[in-house]
Image (cartoon, rainbow, N blue to C red):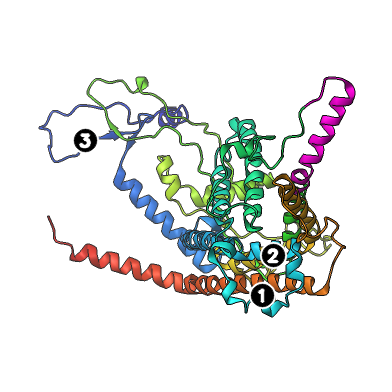
Amino acid sequence: MGMQGPLTSQALGRSPYDDVLEGDGPEDHRHPPQEYDQRGRPVNPDTKRINREIVRSHNEVMLLIGVAEPENPNKSPEAESQRRHDAHEEEIGRQLDSHARRAMEMVGLFGIHGLRQRILIYREYSQIPYWHLWQRKNEFSWRRDVIPGAAAGLFTNYVDRALFRVWLGDREKVLARSILLDVWSYFRTHLKYFASMQRLGLIPADQWLPRPSYFIPFTADSPIPAPPPLEGFDPASLLRWTGHAIINATPFLVWVMVLRVARDLQPEIWTQIFKRLPSTAFRGRRIPPPPVPPTPPIEETAMLLPEGTPIEQLPNALEDVPVVLDSDQIGANVQPDNHETHVNSYMNGEDEYGTDEDESERVNTTLISFDVEATEASPDAPAGLWSAELRPSQATDARGDTQPVYLDTLLTQLPALLAANIYTDTCLRLMMAAYEATALRLMARCHRIQHGLSCDDIYAPNVLSDLSWRAVTNLLGAELIHITISGEIWAAFTGLAQYFHVSDKEWKEAEAKKQVDEQLEDTTAPAL
């Protein structure tokens, strides 16, 4: 019974070496002080380091010979390098995409939108052949053909982008953000109306932005003129005044409806065009984001026990820490079986003094499992005999896949994205040309009548009236010029995207070279 004392102590969580006998000899000052963890157990950092190196080397050998496979390949150094590669190209692609969009906006704002809108409402442009529009150099004017509407358009686009980022993703301010965008929508519609009237030559070009009274209905500057004053408060007078107000607001309301329909159609058209363009978005390789780090428990930092401190009074470390699964594991909600649990405990078990710091430094691996199928027992085979068959992995073999896989980042998607924007805008303008023409003709006629001017040079609101093939040709010619200039911008930014794009091999070589240069700098740095 006496020999079972140490076993009983270990079973109760004690150690047979708890009773320390003070020696009578002189103290050795070269001996390092004993360190303890949060549980009061003696620890030795050198032993833990050696154990970690042994387990790490064991796991590396298992991975190398193919007996084990990584438990999470997305945590490997290669995956981290690919994430850095993706982040690098995403940032460059985001900058190029922003500059390309601004450049394509300039094409319409500086001249092309004005030419197209003048073709839609003025009779003069249906009598001039298309080539003569570009041969009238003596009649060309920057002040009339290029500048009008540009300032209001640039200001509108800038505020649009700035307000879109306000409170974006803030769940507590969803209602406030919605109200802010609705209020801005009212001002944006007026600014676009103002820019179109400038392009048509109905508002002076030297007035870059409208006055504040322009946004107040029934004022002298407002696009909605005031109806005649009330003759009385009887029902007939009120109905007559309401009818005049609706008639005066009709051009503006038609303009609002045209903008609303165009805004609703744009994402649908863009989606249909983008999925028909060659892009890496459909055959690309995306590196998944790094796994969510687990909830950090209280650190088990080594500490020195002062003399006379009982071990029972030390705070205990957290033992049951909740496990935070990765995003893909949360979606799958798959529980590991007993075999994998045994494998992980076998491959990851270092010693009984492991800490959370050690957990992050381990090389987690999973042994390759075997499929065993039950078969009919042979009467001649002895009892307990079984066999297993090695089978190839069910994962898709990259060599057998005939479809290539491309690196998928915003930089590689940039040509397709810009082309989809160009085609979407062109299709949308052609589809909305008839409705836009009706709205612009009503706007121009209302403005002329409000100021007592003639409307003989403006088409009737009916689109089919006075329609000629020459007017259609001029309109298509203006769109051709627009898409041609936009195509040149697309080619320039596509070339920049190809220039900044780096393959996986080149990225790895650049990182290796960077590491070598940093090591050389560290070795050549003068010691202080």
Does residue 145 appear in this view? yes
Q: Residue furthest left?
A: 26
Q: CA distance from mark 2 to mark 1?
A: 12 Å
Tell me the mark number nearer the camera, choosing from 1 and 3.
1
Range of magenta residues: 230-255
Q: Which mark is residue 116?
A: 2
Mark 3 or mark 1, which is nearer the start of the sequence?
3
Please give the count of numbered marks on the rendered protein: 3
On the image, numbered disc 1 is attached to which residue? 133
Mark 1 or mark 2, which is nearer the start of the sequence?
2
Residue 306 location, quadrant: top left
Residue at 49%, 60% (x, y): give it.
95
The amino acid marked with disc number 2 is Arg
The amino acid marked with disc number 1 is Leu
Q: Position of residue 136 (x, y in %)?
A: 62, 76
The amino acid marked with disc number 3 is Pro
Residue at 73%, 78% (x, y): give it.
129
Q: Position of residue 512 (x, y in %)?
A: 38, 69
- Judging depth in this view, the residue of 471 and 58 nearest the camera is 471
> Regarding mark 2 in the picture, which secondary structure is present there?
helix
- Residue 252 on the magenta segment: yes
Q: CA distance from mark 2 to mark 3?
A: 87 Å
> Regarding mark 1 in the picture, which secondary structure is present there?
helix
Q: Which mark is residue 33?
A: 3
Check if mark 1's residue and mark 3's residue have beta carbons within 8 Å: no
Residue 140, compared with residue 450, is above or below; it is below
